[in-house]
Image: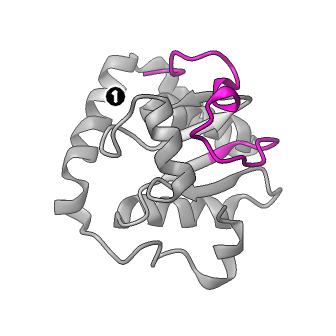
Amino acid sequence: MSRLPRAAYSYRQDPAIPEFPDDKPLFLFDGVCVLCSGGAAWLMRHDKRDLFRFASAQSPLGQALYRHYGLALDDTYLLIAAGHGYGKSAGYLHMLTILGGAWRLGEVFYLVPPAIRDFVYDIVARNRYRWFRKVGYCELIPANLRAKLL
């Protein structure tokens, strides 16, 4: 899955989507998954230039955007960048591009065919609760980083 099939900024015309600042990429993650919340906390800590906004998939904004893109929470996390939705492996690779610097070395994974990257992504996504467990809503986001959540 590369970019999700919707026109840029299509969510702005969707009355079900609460208004939100979309001047920066928005990373939507599963707020009860240890792997997902831990990954969001990692990104918050490493986002030194304050490039991203964050919200959980369970938030009203997250739920509305998932519905807009026709996704179930278990399908993928969601990255909204320059008005486009991205998911699965392509979204993570796009995130590395946005972070820039040494993180762009991860773009080498673009050489792996998307079907293979997403196959691995789907295996982890399907088993994430069993392998990593669940926690309380956004419990793994440190208090000093919670201000980054929409």
Check if residue 16 falls in the magenta segment. Answer: yes
In the figure, residue 113 lies in which quadrant? Answer: top left
Residue at the far front: name it: 15
Q: Position of residue 52 (x, y in %)?
A: 72, 51
Q: Position of residue 137 (x, y in %)?
A: 42, 73
- What residue do we see at 72% from left, 44% from top? 99
In the figure, residue 88 lies in which quadrant? Answer: top left
Q: Position of residue 65 (x, y in %)?
A: 53, 40
Q: Is residue 65 above or below residue 90?
A: below
Amino acid type of disc 1?
Answer: Asp
Q: Residues within 10 Å of mark 1 (few under 14, many from 20)?
A: many
The residue beneath circle 1 is 118
Q: Position of residue 20 (x, y in %)?
A: 73, 48
In-front residue for pair 119/80 = 80
Residue at the far bottom: name it: 143
- SS under mark 1: helix
Specify whether 23 is left or right of 39. Answer: right
Q: Residues in magenta?
A: 1-26
